[in-house]
Amino acid sequence: MRRLCFVDILRMTRACSWWFSVGESYTSSPSYRPCFQTPWLLIPPPEEEEEDDDDKDDKGERKSNSSLCFFNLEEKKAYRDVSLCREVYEGRCVGSSHGWLFLLDKTANLSLFNPFSGARIQVEGSLKVGREEEEEELFDVDSYTADGAKKYTGGRAFISKAILMMSDMGKKKINKDKDGVVLIYRGGQKLAFCMFNDGRFMDLCGAHESYDDVICYDNLVCAISQLYGFVEVWDLSTTGSSPSPIKVMDMRCCLPLKKASVFLESSEQIACSYHFYLVESCGELLSVVRIVGEFMDVHVDGKDNQPQKKILYPYKTLIFYVFRLDLHHEILVEIESLGDQVLFLGGNHSKSLRVQDCPGCVKDSIYFTDSYWERADEDDSYGGHDMGYYNLKDRCVKRFYDTQQRYKMKPTPFWVLPNLW
């Protein structure tokens, strides 16, 4: 079995219950050494299948048994027979972390779902934040039911990002006694966490609304705000059964405004927006700035030797800047190269991997998906399209998946680290 790749093991476990138990026993044994796997891209089914009447109910809505696809970067191939993704259609995906998807249903119930094994974990307890003496509701459930679903963009007005907080990053399985969940909610304005064994969300009381990203790093929870890239850090190591997060840092990270303005002037781009990410890479914490151009005219080649045509994109990623965060000295150092590292950014738990462990990827590059939620959810014909990879040496954005001929991509693509258990 050691010679089997992830897809082969996955298909073996689907054969019958006996083979499933064999696969589970093998992957749970001390001798099991999971092979490194390039993150897969969760995408909607091919466009020709999207309008299949067999996949829709009487109201024209997609049935819950419809399948999504996973795009394999190494093989440049989409798999449809390896995932159990009907649950994604029953709830909005608000995060991807360690191989698990965070799903929020229409009654504001949050759960974790493994699209490969079909395992599901309900995030139990009250969805509240605040201290015991003064709690406030985390979600306005009434406005998230059918009448308010369109207004509140299907859940991201409530949770814009969710990640797992794992005590042992080397293990794939969730430990409900030691692990938990961290959320960015209320349209990015607030932060909260919940230990699985506690059953109650607690506010982290951040000072800089709104937030773009959150990550667990060296037993700390770090969040970066949309306002000048402020980084706030909390120590949760003494949380235990009585949550008592301690804020240990509030660091301002200056934007590369001068460089960005020169670049934008040279590209004749006037309007733009800034998006921030945090990612651990080789034991260090990196801050990544993503600059997105608004209302861009892009010339693309026509088919069959036809002349170029101009397409107006509501928004499109232009460039990235990467910085190393020195939390000890509270300084920021720009990085010109990622070396042999590859970053995966978007709505997922930000990840850095060695290019040797990511067949099919280009080193010194940032692979990104669309996470501009404010714009992705406002247009019925565009959203989810802004993805590709950016090479720090070449300083240009290239595509790894063709989205030019697609309408709105629902659900929005997410990076998922393949994980059977």
Image: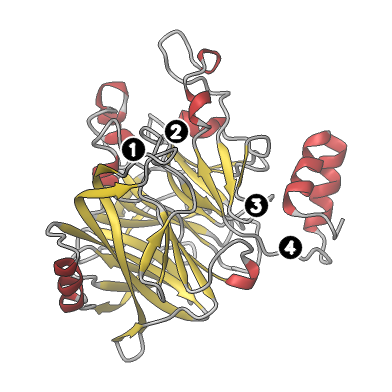
- Nearer to me, 6 or 224: 6
What distance separates the C-alpha of mark 1 from that of mark 4?
34 Å
Where does residue 355 sit, x and y in percent of width and height?
A: 59, 71
Residues at marks 1 and 3 touching, judged by CB atoms closer than 8 Å: no
Tell me the residue at 19%/51% (across/down). Answer: 294
Res 219 visible:
no
- Nearer to me, 175 or 170: 170
Where does label 3 land, which residue? Answer: 75
Q: How many numbered marks appear?
A: 4
> N-terminal of the two: label 3 or label 4?
4
Circle 1 crowding by C-alpha within 10 Å: few under 14, some 14–19, many from 20: many
Q: Amino acid at mark 3?
A: Glu
Above or below, 191 relative to 288: above
Circle 3 crowding by C-alpha within 10 Å: few under 14, some 14–19, many from 20: few
Where does label 2 land, which residue? Answer: 91
Q: Amino acid at mark 2?
A: Gly
What distance separates the C-alpha of mark 2 from that of mark 1?
9 Å
Callout 4: SS: loop
Q: Amino acid at mark 4?
A: Pro
- Front tag of 2 and 3: 3
What distance separates the C-alpha of mark 4 from that of mark 2?
30 Å
Q: Residue furthest bottom?
A: 329
Where does residue 19 sit, x and y in percent of width and height?
A: 86, 41
Give the colour scheme of this rendering. Answer: secondary structure
Q: Which mark is residue 34?
A: 4
- Front tag of 4 and 2: 4
Where does label 1 land, which residue? Answer: 155
Q: Amino acid at mark 1?
A: Gly
Q: Residue furthest top?
A: 58
> N-terminal of the two: label 2 or label 1?
2
Left or right, residue 287 beside residue 103: left
Q: Which mark is residue 112?
A: none
